[in-house]
Amino acid sequence: MLVSIFNDVVGPVMRGPSSSHCAAALRIGRLARDLMDGQFGDLLVEFDRNGSLPTTHESQGSDMGLFGGLLGWDADDERLPGSLPTLRERGVKIRIETVDAGDPHPNTYRLTLRHAEEQHFVRAISTGGGMMEVVDVDTFKVSMAGDCFETLLWVRGEGRKLARDLATLVSADAILVHEAGGEQLVEVKAGEFVSEQTIARLNEAFAIHAVRRLAPVLPVLSRKDTSVPFMTCAEMLAYDAGRNLPLWKLAVDYERARGGLTEAEVIAKMVDIVRILRRSIAQGITGTHYDDRVLGHQSGRFNDLMHAGRLLDGGALNRIILYVTALMEVKSAMGVIVAAPTAGACAALPGAVLAIAEERGLGEEELAKAMLAGGIIGVFIATRWTFAAEVGGCQAEGGSAACMAAAALVDLAGGTLGQSVAAASMAFQSMLGLICDPIANRVEAPCLGKNVMAASNALACANMALAGYDPVIPLDEVIETAKRVAGQMPRELRCTALGGLSITPTSQAIELRLAERKTAACGDCSCRRPTTSG
């Protein structure tokens, strides 16, 4: 699947502490719900012992997101924190177990869903920034990213002939036949579901014993024979061919080709996101409250002191810090944020861009263009690597956010294409090797400081690029280096709550205190968390 700015980079619009955990899990849950046609009474969730999820699924929102998806809710639904008790109130029996599965990806979900007449198994992975992939349905190897309408037909013995006949009846992006154990699964990827009339016609010749329809979960769908003008920074510069187009314009060219949108539609989609971000920042400064978090409301005090002239003179940087901290507080209070590129690194790019735009008196369309400029840099990262801290450490989240924000700020300042790319390279270079070690297993600290650092780094590198500083290493090579460095990192330093600050005595004491508070608050009610066994 080709990367989209709105699918993979600036989005999803969501609630929860982590996009890799909460938003991706919700999308997995939505697809699993459709596989069962919304009907199931028993749910088994299994996590591999050597993955990241046994130690993080509860505190970082995997449970909340997964259960919300199984209820059919959206990623920004205000009911998400209560998804578990709601599912149980509907009579669903839930078990969560830790197993020795040998899954190669650290963010792997194994779901077995049952009711009296039917059972299905789903194995899926969270790939970073809210993106996911279903890799197994029952015993069939598949690849579903939620980017199209999926019609699944179970048949015995004649799947290939059915697929050939089906190809004459419908317009599909792909018709795939999966085989396992004498049974066949015909998968139709298209811009709409196969109609009931077509299914009835096929039933006259084939023994179709089950049909399921899985709705897309991504905002920008994939289309057959889609191509994009470039996929790397070097290819983008070749495409520009010396015209020195602004980076935002090249981002629009890319997204027009990827999503089949007009320039006006691309900009309008980003304007909508800018408006969401502005509301979230205002909410954060006003004050947020949530019991299960490490840090309380702090940005309001910063705002008061900043306007009273009682902080050190940081110029525009102080406004950046304010906006970054406000967004992080909203995230930790289960408010609405935009994963840009992830929830854990949601504040650096928008905090920096909105703060500088306001300092310069720019409007929301200029803001949207700058966010698009940052978004196309994120496309290069997502295409060649990942935003998942479980795979790449915080360099994949905070490092990517700094890289994107630096390019966006240069574009906002009217810098050249070369300067935007130089800023992105310098910002990413200085964050290689950054570990992910959330205190008390919550995505708050040192995540807040890392978002502030990423935004500050972006501002510095943007100004350096505007002044003509030499980045030395091309951006594509920096991305490849980050990927290589990730492979050299111990797994304990990649968002598993097994290393860094996460295992300090203070961190462990905070985690214990939060767990006791939760038990005291709801120890006798139906929202008690399921027991992890194994």
Image (tube, helix red, strand yellow):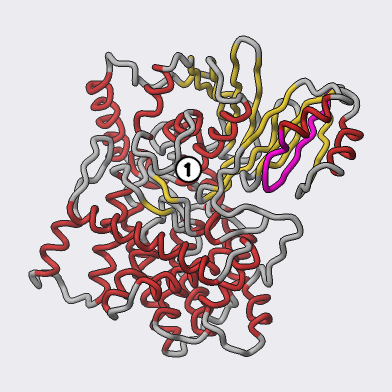
For the question of whether residue 424 can be seen, the reply is yes
> Type of residue at label 1?
Ala
Disc 1 crowd rating (10 Å Cα; few below 14, some 14-19, many 20+) is many
Residue 178 locus on image (x, y percent): 81, 34
Q: Residue furthest top?
A: 116
Location of residue 516 (image quadrant): top left
Q: Secondary structure at mark 1?
A: helix
Numbered range of the magenta stretch: 183-195
Residue at 29%, 55% (x, y): give it.
Answer: 280
- Indicate whether 394 appears above or below 146: below
Left or right: residue 15 versus residue 29 is left
Left or right: residue 474 versus residue 182 is left
- Indicate whether 105 appears above or below 449: above
Q: Main secondary structure of the magenta part?
A: strand
- Indicate whether 472 appears above or below 397: below
Location of residue 327 (image quadrant): bottom left
Between 494 and 19, the one nearer to me in the picture? 19
Location of residue 346 (image quadrant): bottom left
For the question of whether residue 403 can be seen, the reply is no
Residue 131 locus on image (x, y percent): 56, 48
Residue 22 locus on image (x, y percent): 45, 40
Magenta segment includes 192 = yes
Residue 197 locus on image (x, y percent): 75, 32
Judging by the rendered image, the residue that carries numbered circle 1 is 23
Magenta segment includes 466 = no
Left or right: residue 271 versus residue 512 is right
Residue at 50%, 86% (x, y): give it.
Answer: 416
Between 522 and 447, the one nearer to me in the picture? 522
Between 460 and 218, the one nearer to me in the picture? 218
Residue at 36%, 59% (x, y): give it.
Answer: 347
